[in-house]
Every structure is written in structure tokens, then in C-alpha cells.
Image (cartoon, rainbow, N blue to C red):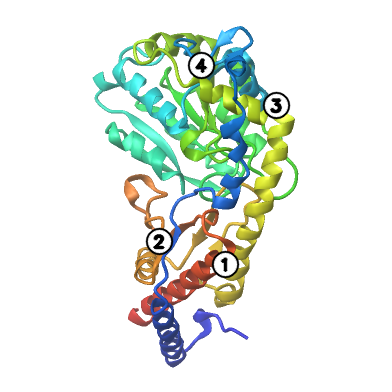
Amino acid sequence: MMKAYSAMTRDELKAARDQELKAYDQLKAKGLKLDMSRGKPGAEQLDLVIGLQSVIQTNEDCFDGSLDCRNYGTPMGIPSCRQLWADLLGVRVEQVMVGGNASLNLMYDTIARAYTHGLLHSDKPWCKLDKVKWLCPVPGYDRHFFVTESFGFEMIPVPMDDNGPDMDLVEELIRDEAVKGIWCVPKYSNPTGCIYSDEVVNRLAAMKPAAKDFLIMWDNAYCIHEFEGDFVPFPDILSLCEKYGNPDMVVEFASTSKVTLPGAGVACMATSEANMKYFMKLMGFQTIGYDKMNQLRHVRFLKDKEHTLALMKRHAAVLAPKFQAVVDGLEREIGPLGFASWSHPKGGYFVSLEVMPGTAKRTVELCKEAGVVMTPAGNPFPYGKDPKDSNIRIAPSLPPKEELEAAVEVLCVCAKLAALEKLLAE
């Protein structure tokens, strides 16, 4: 039976370190090349959607009703694809526009428009302001933080728990007029996998920020990504904001990047009709229209909400064993040692691991030397600075299960070795 590190004598810690060093050297000698750095669908998932490429065969297949999707125009997206997204998100079709393959592109453009032109209720473009501050629930999605950092915003970390961001702190921080927005991944949050509680969602929608152009960036990336159990309906933030008198305070995003093909999917944006009219006016200078043929392919392949959720069940059958392999490995190899904890998500794409404070960077460094690539430690925090140096994001989806089990073995040995090094140095 394993003994917790906290209960070991110094001699026992040294013996444990020597044992893990031996195991580490054996793993390095295998010459592994494994990747758990990003939430990429694995090959088996991509095989599920190969039929997407062949759903359009003839000239007659190129029409969405009377709309010829081969030509210019229709910047809001084709009607059938807008309706599909409205059904999946539970919003009105008038609130939806469909873009290209990446929701991150739509998010970046939204921030960029606020910066260069201001939002619907802005007195001036944000680039004309002395300071722009942004709330960042942590641990969170690194690419969100890269976007706001690229515009020079001051990013303020907000702690997360199983219910979502600390709303007492959020409600205190939004009294500052310089605080212009917040990032949110409300369902199966990246990387913890938590689901925002109804109370948190309602408190977000009911906020009365000092900044009249405050913006909730609602990245609903995993809205249909259950891998355990049936689809879980989620509150519609747009209608809640409208209910509380804040109809223009939120912009929602989603995509098929992990439903069909990541590099050739379809992304959407949903917001109030007033916001949409303002955004589309600015967007008219940027594009004549997105790839309507790809939008049409997706509608022909996914068909409707029911068929889309059926496809997600097939994705779940691939993903669930991989996530279980991660949890099983962590519980077996480091659980009894008492120095780490991890999330137990029921959907999404990540497991969030908390190792001994002060050892996350060292753990990831050791993993890399042993041939396992992880997300850089610190990335789930603004500026890449994890104050505890304890969080590691695990992305189980890409490797085949056998490779994943090998990668988790390496991760566990590295986490143990880093913890023992720290304990012996103290």
C-alpha cells in the first residue's frame, strides 16, 4: 500500500525519489513521442465525419432553398445553417450569424471591433481609453487570454470553483468602469470541465457593470459535448440578459471544430438583434460572405439537432474510455500519495490536474524530456503566470488509448519526481 509523501521520513522520501528516477530513466529510454498539449480530435473521431466531404454531388445540391451557395453574398450565413445553430444553442434564428471555420476568429474580431470602433453602447473606441481591464476566470482557456493580452488589456484573474467564477468578486470588480468584459466557457469549462450553475449564470446575466459597454464573451464551445450520459440542456444566456434588462451585454460563440473537422468546420456567433445589426455593418467592410458551400455541407451532413446529438454520442463512445484511462492512471499512480488532485469532467475536452504547488513547470519539463508534450504550465492563467505553479491541463483526445496510457504513466512519474525533489529541497 502506498504511503502519502507527507507521512514519509526524509530517508523514505530519498528512497522514493531514487525509485522514481529509475522509472523515469526507463521511460526516457523508450524514445516516446506523445502529444497531450491541445484538445484535438483523434483520428477515430475524424473518421466519423468523412461523409461530410461527399454530401454535395451535383449542381442542384448547391442550393439552400432558392439561394445559390456557390456565389457571393449572404454574410449572415445561409438560412438553414443559422437555423441549425439556433436550435443547438436554444436561441432565436434572428440572433445568429454563421462564419468560417473558427469561433476564435469571431471572438478576436469582436474584441478588435470594440477596440477600433467601440461597441453599440460605447462612448468611444476602446483604443482611445487610458486603460481597459478584463476579467479572466482561472484556470481558463489560454487562447482567450492571448487575445486580450494582444490588445494590451489588463487581465484580472478571477478564481473558479465547481459552480463557475467567484461571482462575489466579479460583482465587486465590475464597479470599476475600466472593466470592460469577462471571458466565460460556461459548460465543461476549459480546462476544469465544470458547468456554471444556474445561480452563476443568472448572476452574470443580471449584472449592472459601471461600464455601459461591458461585454460577456460567452464561448459555449462544448455546448453539446457530453461524453457521459445524455445531452444536458443549458440556460440561454441571451434570453436571461434580455430578461434582466441587459440584452446587448453578451455575445455567444460556438463551432463544429470538435463535431466535424477542426480545420474545416463552421463557427457561429449569437447576440442581440441590435448588436447583430451593428456588427454586420462593420463586418460589411471586412467580408462579402463566408464559405457558404461549407455551411451547406454541414447542414446536409448534420441535418438537425437530433442527428447532431446522435453523432455526438458516437464521439462520446470514443472519448469516454480515454478520459477514464486518465482518471484511472492518476488514481492508481498518484492518488494515494496525497499531493495532487484532478477534475472529473463529464464532457468537454480536458482534465485539470493540480500537482504540488511549485512543481507544475518542473513536471511539464520532465515530461517533455521523456517525450510527452503537455500544454505549457501556466498557460491556463493570464500572462502564463500560475501563482501556485500547480495547474497542468491534460488533453486526452488526440492519442490512441494505448499511447494515452503510456503518456499518463510518464506524467505520473514526472509529477512524483518533481514533488519529491521539492520536498527534499525544503
Amino acid type, callout 1: Glu
Please report contact status of discs 3 and 4: CB closer than 8 Å, yes or no. no
Q: Quick one: label 1 or label 4, which is nearer the N terminus?
A: 4
Amino acid type, callout 2: Val
What percent of the width, then of the height, locates residue 364? Answer: 38, 64
Residue on which the image places disc 4 = 248
**20 to 229, vertically: above or below:** below
Mark 4 → mark 2, Cα distance in angstroms: 41 Å
Please report contact status of discs 4 and 2: CB closer than 8 Å, yes or no. no
Residue on which the image places disc 3 = 304
Disc 3 residue crowd, few under 14, some 14–19, many 20+, Cα 10 Å = some
Mark 3 → mark 4, Cα distance in angstroms: 28 Å
Quarter of the image with the C terminus in it: bottom left
Viewer-side residue, 2 vs 58? 58
Residue on which the image places disc 2 = 373
**128 to 356, vertically: above or below:** above
Residue on which the image places disc 1 = 402
Viewer-side residue, 235 vs 281? 281
Mark 3 → mark 2, Cα distance in angstroms: 37 Å
Please report contact status of discs 1 and 3: CB closer than 8 Å, yes or no. no
